[in-house]
Image (cartoon, rainbow, N blue to C red):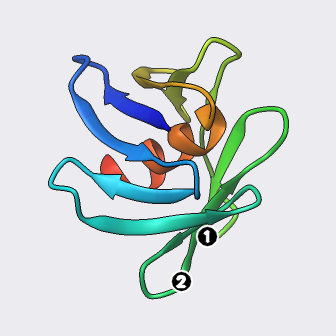
Amino acid sequence: MGNIYDVLDRRMGTVDDDRLIWNTKSEKIGYADDKKIFDMENHLVGWVETDGKIYDTDGHHAGYVDPTGTVYDWNGKKVGHSETPHMELGAAVLLLMMLR
């Protein structure tokens, strides 16, 4: 299970071991399939590349995650961090679902 935090270190949600995405109210808000993120209506929200770059559904660069789990928006501004084992997925969830 990997927790997701905003820039103020507040927990925003979790990606569990089954790659289900939960908010802090214990509500399931989406899931991950490979490196793609989907909402609960099975709509693609975006994806993360192996280099840590994160893209939205339209293919726009939304940001990236560095090797330590720090998450940055497309301008390079730090917006939070994500924990392993689902660090890259958590970063994508933060940018694509929780901060929009």
94 versus 45 height, above or below: above
Where does residue 31 sit, x and y in percent of width and height?
53, 66
Residue 64 seen in the current view:
yes
Residue underneath mark 2: 43
Q: From mark 2 to mark 1, how far is it between C-alphas?
A: 9 Å
Instruction: Decide if residue 100 is in sight here.
Output: no
Residue carrying label 1: 57
Which of the marked residues, 2 or 1, is nearer the chain's N terminus?
2
Numbered disc 1: secondary structure = loop
The answer to which image quadrant residue 34 occupies is bottom right
Asked if residue 51 lies left or right of residue 31, the reply is right
SS at mark 2 in the image: loop
Q: Give the total of numbered labels.
A: 2
Q: Is residue 65 left or right of residue 97?
A: right
Q: Nearer the viewer, mark 2 or mark 1?
A: 2
Q: Amino acid at mark 1?
A: Thr
In this rendered view, identify the residue nearer to me: 11 or 53: 11
The residue furthest bottom is 41
- Note whether 40 is above or below 67 in the view shown: below
Count residues near mark 2 (Cα–Cα under 10 Å), then give few for <14, some for 14-19, many for 20+.
few
* Callout 2 amino acid: His
**Residue at the spot x=33%, y=67% of the render?**
28
The image quarter containing residue 67 is top right
